[in-house]
Image: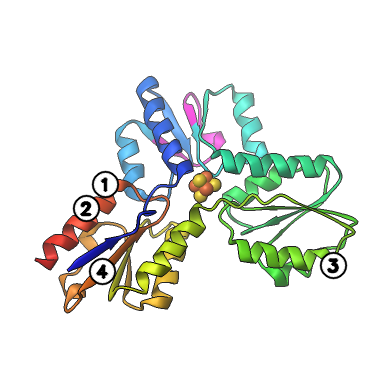
Amino acid sequence: MEIILAKSAGFCFGVKRAVNMAYRAAENSEHICSLGPLIHSPQLVQRLEGKGIRVQNSVEQIVDETVIIRSHGITRNEEQALERKGLPVVDATCPFVKKAQQYAALLGKEGYSVVIVGEQEHPEVQGIISYVAGSETSVVANPEEARTVTPHKKLGLVAQTTQSFDNFSEIVQELLENSKELRIFNTICDATAVRQEEARQIAGRVALMVVIGGHNSANTTRLARICSEIQPRTHHIETADEICADWLDGVEAVGVTAGASTPEWIIRDVVDRLTAVAK
Ligand code: SF4
């Protein structure tokens, strides 16, 4: 049986950077925590706990610890609360997310009504929005929602980094009708698109697709959905233990991919298990 492993499977630049920063910080500090789980991989969060990195869910809970900020960033309020408490901070916000926050702040400062393309409840979007001071803000997820944006003579646009380019450009089309001036910062990072495109291609060539990543990871869940539209025999798993031998009955080629928050050792375990089961 052939196993086709996606080249793009696993950590993106920002997640790899955050995890490395966390490991380094754990070596230098005994009292250390992340504000929220560092990434959407329960297995990695557990390993980090083994290194002494606890998960704290709010700034209020933190007393005397070094605080690691996740790759998708925090809100301005949280940042200020950490400053007020005088806690040491390891800022692992992905530089691409930082850029989106800075552009949103700039647009607000220059009097634009700021539109963020993304998912309202996502912490990254909550973070971006919080950096806009003194201007109107709205979050739109799709072109239909863009039609409801209040017309404004100056509209400014940024995107949640994981948005699809097609959705973003359709929203731009809609907003052109709502404004005399539309200033756009394309803050989309292509890590998501690259993973999705490669997954689509592999899913079209195999009889079984395995997508690895936290069940709580939105980007892995989306990857699995994309694959299952092409290859209905797609399984979203977190670890190799979930693989059933009968999935492989009569299968000549299996595709494997993983979300941007899936550690390499888990991907390796899955490939090893598939190889063992196929024998
Ligand atoms: S998906 Fe892109 S923006 Fe988000 S953490 Fe990864 S590299 Fe950074």
Which residue is painted at 45% across and 70% down in the image?
226
Above or below, 225 relative to 70: below
- Residue at numbered disc 2: 269
- SS of the residue at dot 3? loop
Above or below, 93 relative to 140: above
How packed is label 3: few (under 14 Cα within 10 Å), some, or many (20 or more)?
few
The CA span between labels 2 and 3 is 51 Å
Number of the label disc, if any, that sits on residue 265: 1
Q: Are marks 2 and 1 in contact (CB under 8 Å)?
A: yes
Between 92 and 68, the one nearer to me in the picture: 92
Labels 4 and 3: the sequence-earlier one? 3
Number of the label disc, if any, that sits on residue 177: 3
The CA span between labels 1 and 4 is 19 Å
Tag 2: residue type? Asp
Tag 4: residue type? Val
For the C terminus, the quadrant is: bottom left
Q: Are marks 1 and 4 in contact (CB under 8 Å)?
A: no
For the N terminus, the quadrant is: bottom left
Q: Position of residue 86 (x, y in %)?
A: 59, 21
Labels 3 and 1: the sequence-earlier one? 3
Residue at the outermost left position: 279
**From the viewer's perspective, is the residue at label 1 or at label 4 nearer?**
4
**From the viewer's perspective, is the residue at label 2 or at label 3 nearer?**
3
The image quarter containing residue 195 is bottom left
Labels 1 and 4: the sequence-earlier one? 4
Q: Give the residues drawn in magenta, as a range.
A: 54-67
Say whether residue 198 is visible. Answer: yes
**From the viewer's perspective, is the residue at label 3 or at label 1 nearer?**
3
- SS of the residue at dot 1? helix
Number of the label disc, if any, that sits on residue 254: 4
Queried whether the magenta region covers residue 277, the answer comes back as: no
